[in-house]
Image: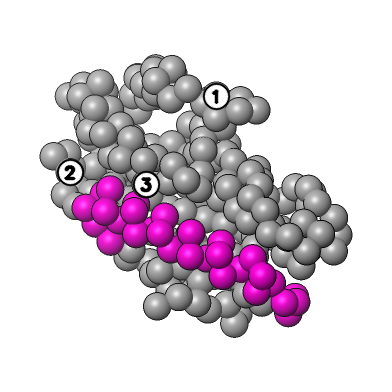
Amino acid sequence: MDRNYLTGVANPYNMAQPWKIYEKSVGMWVVESNRSVFSFPLSTEETDVKSVAREYFHYLDDIMVALRDLFAVTAIEYPQGKLLVESPIPLYMDQSKDRLIIAWEDDTKKCESWAPGAIFSGLTEVVVDADGKTVKSQLPNVLKMMFSGVPGSDQYALVLSTNCDIWLDKTISGSDNSIIGTTNSLRLKCALEGIADALDGKVVHFASEFPGVEINEHGFGLK
């Protein structure tokens, strides 16, 4: 996962906002699925990509339902660093899935083993402070996720990552962010729980690159 995907994104409101975007990861969670019918990586000589895609997209659809009130996809990378599709508004996912299948099929022609996967970025609905009022806003690239089959296993994993401290009651720099931090962190918690349910799995790893950030399987500073 590219940890610098938010670098250079400007604060869309004003410099008085306490939260910021960083080059390092403020929070990252790995949610692992229940067992797949496939074991990864797959032999490209024996693999029907469309059959694998049916299971992958079944999980992905459930994930997107779990994230529907928080996150909308506007760009897909496959492989990492190569933009497959991008739009200023949420993508029409049926067409995007077709593009991803074509990219997967092309990839299987170049290698002996393969696992399905992609990186998704987009718009995240968060609450912000606007002149003392709490309002909802859609911010680009506040969240990013990678969903893929895990080599050496029969499971999928979703990695959800953020380089923004808009979720914290106290920002990385120590500023008070309690007006919006609690609301945003609760929404993130619901999203993580929804993803775990969608994958019939659980959070197996979480981390922050910033010392002192309270992070656990539920998000930031929540039990």
Which residue is found at the position 48% from the left and 65% from the top? 186
Q: Residue furthest bottom?
A: 212
Determine crowd level at label 1: few under 14, some 14-19, many 20+ residues with C-alpha closer than 10 A. Answer: some
Q: Any magenta on residue 151?
A: no
Label 1 sits on what residue type? Val
What amino acid is labelled 3 in the image?
Ala
Residue 60 disc label: none
Inspect this view and state whether residue 150 appears.
Answer: yes
Q: Which mark is residue 66?
A: 3
Q: CA distance from mark 1 to mark 3?
A: 22 Å
The amino acid sitting under disc 2 is Ser
Residue 35 pos. (x, y %): 16, 49
Q: Residue furthest right?
A: 15
Residue 200 inside the magenta-drawn segment: yes
54, above or below 173, in the image: above
Q: Earlier in the sequence, mark 1 or mark 3?
A: 3
Q: In the picture shown, does residue 106 fall above or below 220?
A: above
Mark 2 packing: few (<14 Cα in 10 Å), some, or many (20+)?
A: some
Residue 19 horizontal/vertical position (percent): 72, 64
Q: Secondary structure at mark 2?
A: strand
Question: Which residue is drawn at the image coordinates 34% and 53% (left, top)?
Answer: 194
| Closest to the observer, 11 or 129 | 129
Nearer-N-terminus badge (3/2): 2
Q: What secondary structure predominates along the stretch shown in magenta?
A: helix
Please state the extent of the stretch shown in magenta in the rendering. 173-202
Q: Which of 54/188 is in front?
A: 188
Residue 19 left/right relative to 66: right
Question: Which image quarter holds the C terminus?
Answer: bottom left
Q: Which residue is mark 1?
A: 85
81 left or right of 32 in image: right
